[in-house]
Amino acid sequence: MKILSLDLGNNMGVCFHDTQENFFTYNLLQFKGKDIFEKFCDTVHETLGTFYPDLIITATPVLMPGRSNILISQMKKYGALCAIAHRFDKTVLDFKDSHAKKVVLGSGRANKDAIKRFYEGSNITIDSPDVRDARMFLDCYLQTV
């Protein structure tokens, strides 16, 4: 099974895993300037066309107190991801960030430093918090199936 895991931020963390070949690849995609949303949609479309995954995993958009602008941005990106995935006839599965942290790290309140330490301790070199989050969502799925 080919699984694509995405952390949907202004910097999009990408983790691709082929379970048959036990192959992982990581990437960080950055969106800046005008037309960020259009660039995001084009990049997601290109990424799905490159990897052609069987399953797409991401985080559930969440309202954080005092940061409704982030929810709006995440909802737009999540909606675009679902629409593009539909065009490829692919399923999108999402996990709450706290659920993924609980499953993978043992604590739903783990911070970015705890996630970094976990992956460093696993001999997985990932130098971006966004890519680590994408890997965490993938690991959550792999541990729950």
Image (cartoon, helix red, strand yellow):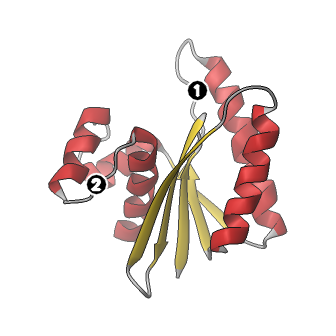
Residue lying at the far top of the rendered structure: 66
The answer to which of 82 and 12 lies nearer the viewer is 12
Q: Which mark is residue 63?
A: 1
Q: What residue type is disc 2 on?
A: Thr
Q: Residue at x 62, y 77 (%)?
A: 54
Residue at (39, 60) in percent of width and height: 140
Residue 44 at what x, y percent from top left?
A: 71, 54
Depth check, front residue: 126 or 139: 126
**Image position, residue 120 (x, y; %):** 20, 50
Instruction: State whether residue 116 is above or below residue 19.
Output: above
Q: Are marks 2 and 1 in contact (CB under 8 Å)?
A: no
Image depth: mark 2 or mark 1 in front:
2
Q: Quadrant of residue 11?
A: top right
**Residue bearing the label numbered 2:** 125
Any part of residue 111 in sight: no
Q: Is residue 130 left or right of residue 112?
A: right
**81 vs 144: above or below:** above
Quadrant (top left, top right, bottom left, bottom right) of the C terminus: bottom left
Query: What separation in Å lies between label 2 and label 1 (alpha carbons)?
Result: 30 Å
Residue drawn where x is 26% and y is 59% of the image: 124
